[in-house]
Amino acid sequence: MISAVSLLGFMAALFTTLALVPQVIRTFKTRDTRGISLWMYAMSSLGVFLWMVYGIVLQAWPIIIANAVTFILMIIILIMKIRLG
């Protein structure tokens, strides 16, 4: 059975991860990355990756899953920013 604390973590992870989906969709549709900061996404991607590693060390699945998905979404945007300018 999932604990209340883990459920809270999964819910927080769900909302913070889903917050990136509109940006990914918009970037794919418009191919416009001019309003996106390369350095912000690069540093944020590194931070999210480190949070994922932290979750792995703690074996905290809400942290691992949320940051793995968030990292993938951020890398998609970062790659598009690098390719499209």
Image (cartoon, helix red, strand yellow):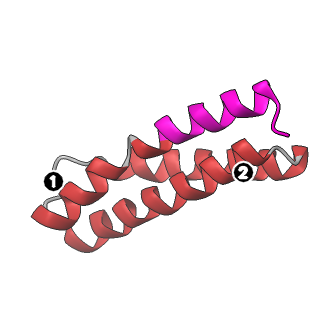
Question: CA–CA distance between discs 1 and 2?
Answer: 31 Å
Q: Residue at label 2?
A: 64
In the image: residue 79, left or right of residue 17: left
Near-viewer residue (53 or 69)? 69
Whether residue 72 appears in magenta in the rendering, the answer is no
Residue range in magenta is: 1-16
Q: Please, what secondary structure does the residue beneath circle 2 have?
A: helix
In the image: residue 55, left or right of residue 28: right
Where residue 4 appears, as percent x and y from the top left, is 77, 25
Residue at image position (76%, 33%) is: 6
Where residue 75 appears, as percent x and y from the top left, is 45, 63
In the image: residue 10, left or right of residue 41: right
Residue at image position (79%, 46%) is: 55
Mark 1 residue type: Arg
Near-viewer residue (31 or 59)? 59
Tell me the quadrant of the picture where the N terminus can be found: top right
Mark 2 residue type: Ile
Question: Is residue 78 depicted above or below 48 in this figure?
Answer: below
Instruction: Give the crowd class for mark 2: few <14, some 14-19, many >=20 residues within 10 Å.
Output: many
Question: Is residue 11 depicted above or below 74 in this figure?
Answer: above
Where residue 19 appears, as percent x and y from the top left, is 38, 40
Q: Residue at label 1?
A: 34
Where residue 35 appears, as percent x and y from the top left, is 18, 46
